[in-house]
Amino acid sequence: MVWKHFGSILIETLSQTGIDFLTEGVIIKASPTLTPIVYFLLKNGLSYFFYTLKQEDMNWPFNSKAPLTLEAVKIDLKITF
């Protein structure tokens, strides 16, 4: 189980690092003004992608059980006089 976890983390870390190198090497040279927006969309899109994959398999891409998760929505309204 430990090796599956490390393998999953390694794949995610390499993907995130790949976006860093892509941004520094290609996107900044092509369009410096749009770089922060593109970087934000790529990094958060990849994070959401891995989040959705790991909801079903805890150590994606290796076969494992579904993780224990708690999903909740909290709405709070405060009125102060």
Image (tube, rainbow, N blue to C red):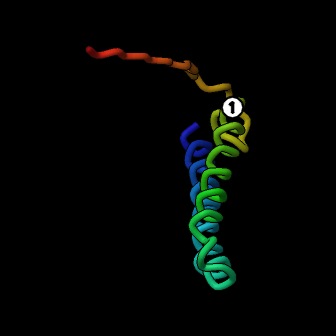
Q: Residue at x 57, y 43 (%)?
A: 5
Report x, y in % for residue 39. 60, 64
Indicate the quadrant where residue 34 lies: bottom right
Q: Toward the viewer: 54 or 30? A: 30
Residue that lies at the very extreme toward the front in this rendered image: 81
Image spot of residue 46 (x, y percent): 66, 52
40 and 1: which is toward the camera: 40
Residue at image coords 70%, 45%: 49
Q: Amino acid at mark 1?
A: Ser
- The C terminus appears in which quarter of the rendering? top left
The answer to whether 29 is drawn above or below residue 61 in the figure is below
Residue that appears at 73% across and 35% down: 63
Tell me which residue sits at (61%, 63%) in the image.
37
Secondary structure of the residue carrying tag 1 is loop
Mark 1 burial class by Cα count in 10 Å: few <14, some 14-19, many 20+: some
State the image coordinates of residue 67 (x, y, percent, origin top left). Answer: 61, 26
Residue nearer the viewer, 1 or 31: 31
| Number of dots carrying numbers | 1
**Left or right of residue 81: residue 33:** right
Residue 22 rendering spot, x and y as whole percentages: 65, 74
Q: Is residue 40 above or below residue 1?
A: below
Q: Quadrant of the N terminus?
A: top right
Does residue 9 lie above or below 25 as drawn? above
- In the picture as drawn, the residue positioned furthest to the left comes out as 81
For disc 1, the marked residue is 64
